Image (spheres, coloured by chain):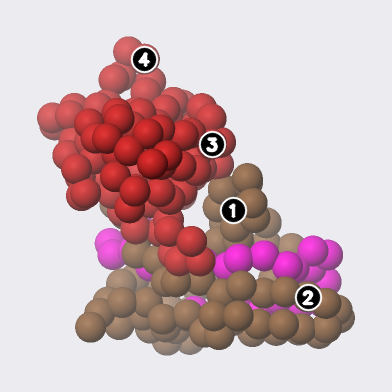
Chain colours: A brown, B red
């Protein structure tokens, strides 16, 4: 089955630790995205990549880092510099470099920092 | 630049009643418009989209939306609500060569 796989689904970490969220897609999509979702705030774009080995900052990139070494993979690292990392993180992909606007989402990763 | 406003963070309707979720947008170029649905602890799923052509767009699960340029609106409707429609709904806009912008979401509650 084609789709986007995010792991882990739930993650607990102590304050000050870096964590990496995995996102893998087998849809052969060029573009991949990371969003953060907080209650009542909708989706906010963290980073996006329209092609392998290239990525751009979104609206709330501070405290996060990404890599795009393979077309299928777009991991997100939440660093200790992120002041309020507890949130629901969503990965998405899109064909055609994302220009169609239609996104395909994974099931999300819920990060809780204790 | 684009922006989206969803009116009402929570909407409650009785089972069998009309569902109406409101979305207004702002765009400096002809927009692409979308409605996505999110069930608890899951990702978003596309309900329907407007790109060009017919302004009344039909989507999955009996939902439809009408693009009204004069009102800069893209409201989502369903004639008869079902308990399974309880979810959060997001309106989104893109200027085709720009990032997709999401509204803050409307949580739909279905009353028995």
Q: Are marks 2 and 1 on the same chain?
A: yes
**Circle 2 residues within 10 Å: few <14, some 14–19, many ≥20:** some
Q: As drawn, which residue projects farthest toward the left?
A: B54
Residue B17 screen position, x and y as percent: 30, 30
Question: What residue sits right under mark 3 in the picture?
Answer: B10
Q: Is residue B12 visible?
A: yes
Q: As drawn, which residue projects farthest toward the right?
A: A16
Q: CA distance from mark 2 to mark 1?
A: 19 Å
- The subunit letter for the residue under badge 3 reads B
Q: CA distance from mark 3 to mark 1?
A: 20 Å
Q: Secondary structure at mark 3?
A: strand
Tell me, yes or no, whether the two marked residues, 4 and 2, touch with CB atoms within 8 Å. no
Q: Earlier in the sequence, mark 2 or mark 1?
A: 1
| Residue numbers of the magenta segment | A74-99
Return the residue nearer the eye: A60 or A38.
A38
Q: CA distance from mark 3 to mark 4?
A: 22 Å
Question: Comparing marks 2 and 1, which lies closer to the viewer?
Answer: 2
Q: Are marks 3 and 1 on the same chain?
A: no
Question: What residue sits right under mark 1 in the picture?
Answer: A44
Q: Quadrant of residue B44?
A: bottom left
Q: Of the numbered discs in the image, which one, if any, rests on residue B71?
A: 4
Q: Are marks 4 and 2 on the same chain?
A: no
């Amino acid at each position: 089955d084609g789709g986007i796989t995010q792991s882990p689904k739930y993650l607990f970490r102590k304050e000050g630790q870096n964590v990496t969220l995995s996102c893998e897609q087998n849809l052969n999509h060029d573009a991949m995205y990371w969003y953060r979702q907080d209650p009542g705030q909708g989706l906010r774009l963290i980073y996006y990549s329209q092609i392998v080995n290239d990525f751009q900052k979104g609206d709330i990139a501070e405290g996060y880092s990404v890599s795009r070494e393979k077309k299928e993979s777009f991991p997100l690292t939440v660093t200790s510099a992120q002041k309020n990392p507890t949130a629901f993180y969503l990965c998405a992909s899109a064909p055609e470099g994302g220009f169609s606007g239609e996104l395909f989402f994974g099931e999300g990763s819920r990060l809780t920092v204790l | 630049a684009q922006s989206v406003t969803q009116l009402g963070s929570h909407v409650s309707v009785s089972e069998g009643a009309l569902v109406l979720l409101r979305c207004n947008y702002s765009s400096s170029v002809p927009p692409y418009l979308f409605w996505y649905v999110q069930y608890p602890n899951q990702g978003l799923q596309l309900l329907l989209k407007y790109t060009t052509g017919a302004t009344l767009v039909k989507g999955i699960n009996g939902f439809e939306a009408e693009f009204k340029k004069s009102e800069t609106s893209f409201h989502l409707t369903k004639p008869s609500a079902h308990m399974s429609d309880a979810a959060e709904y997001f309106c989104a806009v893109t200027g085709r060569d720009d990032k997709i912008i999401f509204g803050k979401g409307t949580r739909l509650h279905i009353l028995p």
